[in-house]
Amino acid sequence: MPEVFSPIRWKSNQLELIDQRALPDREVWLNVTSVEQTAQAITDMVVRGAPAIGITAAYGVALSCLEISQKKSKEWKHLLSKDLELLAQSRPTAVNLFWALERMQSVLNEAESPSQAFEIALTEAKMIHQEDYQMNLAIGEYGSSLLPDSAVVLTHCNTGALATGGHGTALGVIRSAWQKGNLQHVYANETRPWLQGSRLTIWELLKENIPCTLQADSAAALLMKSKKIDWIIVGADRIAANGDTANKIGTYSLALLAKAHGVKFMVAAPTSTIDMQLESGDLIPIEERSAGELWSSASKTDIPEKLNFHNPVFDVTPAGFIDAIVTEKGIATSNERGLFSQAFSTWFQA
Ligand code: MRU
């Protein structure tokens, strides 16, 4: 990997992850030495963001191969497929996880021994990691070309270096625009309930002195009414074949608000986030997380037994509300006459 910040490192046959639960207060790196710890780290949001989850799972497969090679079992292929299954259970919505596991499985079909499997898995995981960074640079170039001079944008969740192999997707577009000199200001939603915006996006923006303003998610409508916002730029966890896009909860409301206020709406993601198996966003599994994520911002007491809660952590924005989907392969604009699907087919044929 080139010398860029990435939340994922491989060192001395161990995986190292920056613990995103501790940011922005503390920069803590956790050592991950087994496939079980890898799956748990994904479930617990030590690492999060669709591309970063996929990269981490790929290194998790390498850890699995390493452990299996030390056991010297004849059943190694069976053990490996159980580990792949364990990783697949770690989170349901980001398709990059399943994309990475399938890619790992397909290269591992060639392996003739556990030690060879480890070599193959590690090489492939490093390649997935590096490719993700390169794809983000391309997304940044394409996405920033859509922005006017002195652009003012709003983003949601964290889609930066922390969520990817480096640079970021939506935040990568913002970063590239800043580097090219055509970004004036970024508004960042705090992104309730887990606060990916206030804890992670702001951490990244402040580090690079990119002019930014933090706001409550519920301030977005007023912002669009009272200030000229050129684009809302978000990432994606899974894009269906028709362009419907699952992303962090609150994205759909932003798209509706954007339409009402004449603000353009961009989704930036690598093609590994497009799931051509799913015809529409209705088929995307939406993760529900615990009551604790909601209750902890209200009180330090135990969650009341009688509390009903609703904590879906993603929603689906219909393709018709999206002006542009930007990937490393190019820009697909407007969903009239199925243009997103046409662009996707071209990208996947190339
Ligand atoms: O629950 P998270 O933090 O994993 O959700 C992350 C998002 O929704 C991001 O917008 C998406 O994964 C794109 S990250 C480049």
Image (tube, grey):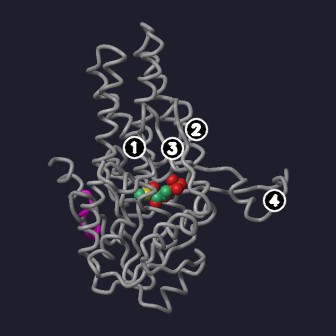
Residue under pointer 1: 55
Residues rendered magenta in the picture: 333-341
Q: Which SS class for mark 3?
A: loop
Question: Where in the figure is residue 243, as x and y percent of width and height?
Answer: 34, 59
What residue is pinned by disc 2?
40
Secondary structure under the numbered disc 4 in the rendered image: loop
Amino acid type at image mark 3: Pro
**Nearest to the observer: residue 90 or residue 283:** 90
- Image height check: is 46 above or below 250? above
Residue 24 % position (x, y): 58, 63
Disc assigned to residue 300: 4
Which comes before the other along the chain, label 2 or label 1? 2
Q: Are marks 2 and 1 in contact (CB under 8 Å)?
A: no
Type of secondary structure dominating the magenta stretch: helix
Three-letter residue code for mark 1 = Ile
- Residue at coordinates 53% horizontally, 63% vertically from top-left? 200
- Among all residues in the image, which is located at the extreme top? 74
Q: Earlier in the sequence, mark 3 or mark 4?
A: 3
